[in-house]
Image: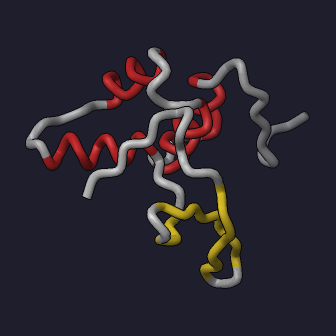
Amino acid sequence: MQFHYHPDNRPKPKGWATINRKRYPTVLVEKVQRFPANRIIRDLVDVARDGRKMDLNEIVIRAAHGAYCKEEMHELYRLMGYSVCGFSEVFEDDLIGSSMWKS
């Protein structure tokens, strides 16, 4: 099953689910409660299903053309385990802080 969400018609948060007592937002898609899809991950799955490949450069190019919002790119870099310092260099226009940095 493929899910294609255009930036303007992504499902709005509706409710939440808990995992180990931590709340996570959910959306309703065709009357099914789901965790919100990250469009980058969905595209990676769709591309792989078609037997193609998509690397980080293509993802960045797609983001530059508006295919992905900044929050999705933030999530991708966090999930990749990017260093906080490296994250601050990639997203230099954002205010990034760390409890391990000296003031």
In the rendered image, the residue lying farthest to the front is 30
- Check the picture and name the quadrant holding the C terminus: top right
Residue 49 versus residue 98: which sits nearer the camera?
Answer: 49
Q: Residue reaching furthest bottom?
A: 20
36 to the left or right of 84: left
Residue 91, image quadrant: top right
x and y percent of residue 67 in the render?
44, 26
User: Does 86 appear above or below 23?
Assistant: above
Q: Residue at x 47, y 71 (%)?
A: 32
Image quadrant occupied by the N terminus: bottom left
| Residue under the image location 27 percent in, 31 percent down | 55
**Left or right, 95 with reference to 22:** right
Which x, y percent locates residue 12? Answer: 63, 51
Above or below, comparing residue 58 to residue 33 in the picture? above
* Residue at position x 73%, y 26% in the image: 94
Colour setting: secondary structure
Q: Which residue is painted at 63% across and 39% down in the image?
A: 84
Residue 43: x and y, percent? 32, 41
Q: How many marks?
A: 0
Quadrant of the image occupied by residue 92: top right
Q: Residue furthest right?
A: 103
Q: Is residue 51 above or below residue 27?
A: above
The picture places residue 37, in percent across and down from the top left corner, at: 47, 53
Q: Relative to the observer, which residue lies in front, 14 or 83?
A: 14
